[in-house]
Amino acid sequence: MSVNIPLIDISAYPAGGEAAIAALARTVDRACTDIGFLLVSGHGVPDRLIDDIRRVSRRFFAGAETAKLAYRMPADRYRGYVAMESEALANSLDEPTPPDIKESFNIGPLEGPMDAYRRAATPARFFAENLWPEDEEFRAVWSAYYRAMEELSFRLMRIFALALGMAENFFDDRIDRHITNFTVLHYPAQKHPPKPGQLRAGAHTDYGSLTIVKPDDTPGGLQVLDKTGRWIDVPHVPEAFVVNLGDLMADWTNDRWVSTMHRVVNPPADSPVSTGRISMAFFHQPNYDAVIECLPTCTDPDRPPRHKATTSGEHVWMKITKHRDTEPGSAA
């Protein structure tokens, strides 16, 4: 049976009463078990901030290609600009496809003191410096949005803990120095027909604990593969974020919760040629040294742990390495 993607108002946490919070936790658990996707309202992120990041990001992508390539992603870190048709996300699942019809700009954790913890990051440079365009407003708006997503992801992880029957602060010290990448993706208007099998973003799963996405409402959007094998559209709800689980969360919960295949399809052939799309994606990833092993509430004698213990850093680096082995220059 196909499962719809639920719209969940999270405003009950943390200010709601005990019964309201318990009901919210049950609703989130059901969504994460059934489909691994949910629409989240009541998040408190200002509309003005969302409008601002769309505006400055569109301005960047509208710039000359030579100007954008000045911030091209280096080989040693996932920061900066990824040019049009440089990635094929389906390759990460060993499904060779033409390159995705998109470009992106990416940042990691905001700059802070390079203390012993950051210097010891392994197995990659998770706290490498970001590459910022020479646009003061761009940096200010992106930084403000990143911080807003940090706050929202912290809140969601507390709700997740309750939904999993854990203490609400269980994840706190596992995400307080997270290694999250934030990406704005630009899917341009398609003036020419795509190649056979070519999509805006090929079918894939995400790598980390959760992803917070803010898409726009232009044609050619996000689809999810449900348990019946049917691709369903993720509805656009103006006041909501799309939240989905990544592979790390599925492993952490012993596959009680699901990391679901999704893709971004092309606009209909009769769409206006001006139909471009901007999508903001916060790929939340716990601290690099956070141990990822089966949660005690997700195993019993009939459900032994299915995944080997690892760390967040090792897990994401394994995923990135596999991706780069199949498509040079691409990553999470």
Image (tube, rainbow, N blue to C red):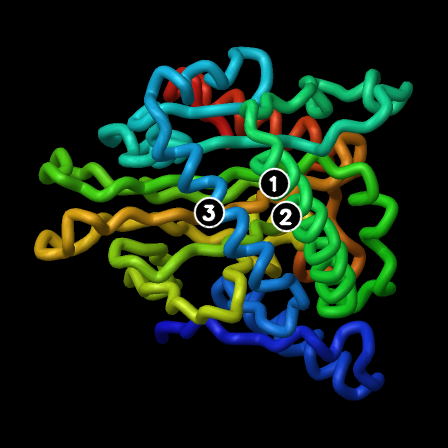
Relative depth, front residue between 315 and 232 = 232
Q: Name the residue under label 1.
A: 142
* Residue 300 appears anywhere in the view: no
Q: Please tell me whether mark 2 sits on a helix, a strand or a loop.
A: helix
**Amino acid at the residue labelled 2:** Tyr
Q: Decide: marks 2, 1 in contact (CB < 8 A)?
A: yes
Quarter location, residue 170: bottom right
- Neighbour tally class for label 1: few under 14, some 14-19, many 20 plus, Cα within 10 Å: many
Kindly identify the residue that appears in the image at 43 percent across and 55 percent down: 215
Q: Which labelled disc corresponds to residue 145?
A: 2
Kindly identify the residue that appears in the image at 71 percent across and 47 percent down: 147
Return the x and y of residue 130 as percentages of the image width and height: 64, 24
Quarter location, residue 202: top left
Q: Distance between the residues labelled 2 and 3?
A: 13 Å
Return the x and y of residue 281 as percentages of the image width and height: 52, 46
Kindly identify the residue that appears in the image at 27 percent across and 35 percent down: 101
Q: How far apart are marks 3 and 1 (CA)?
A: 11 Å
Dot placed on the residue nearer the N-terminal end, 3 or 1: 3
**Amino acid at the residue labelled 1:** Trp
Where 63 falls versus 325 (above or below)? below
**Amino acid at the residue labelled 3:** Arg
Q: Mark 3 points at which residue?
A: 55
Relative to 58, 319 lies left or right? right
Dot placed on the residue nearer the N-terminal end, 2 or 3: 3
Q: Please tell me whether mark 3 sits on a helix, a strand or a loop.
A: helix
Relative depth, front residue between 284 and 106 = 106
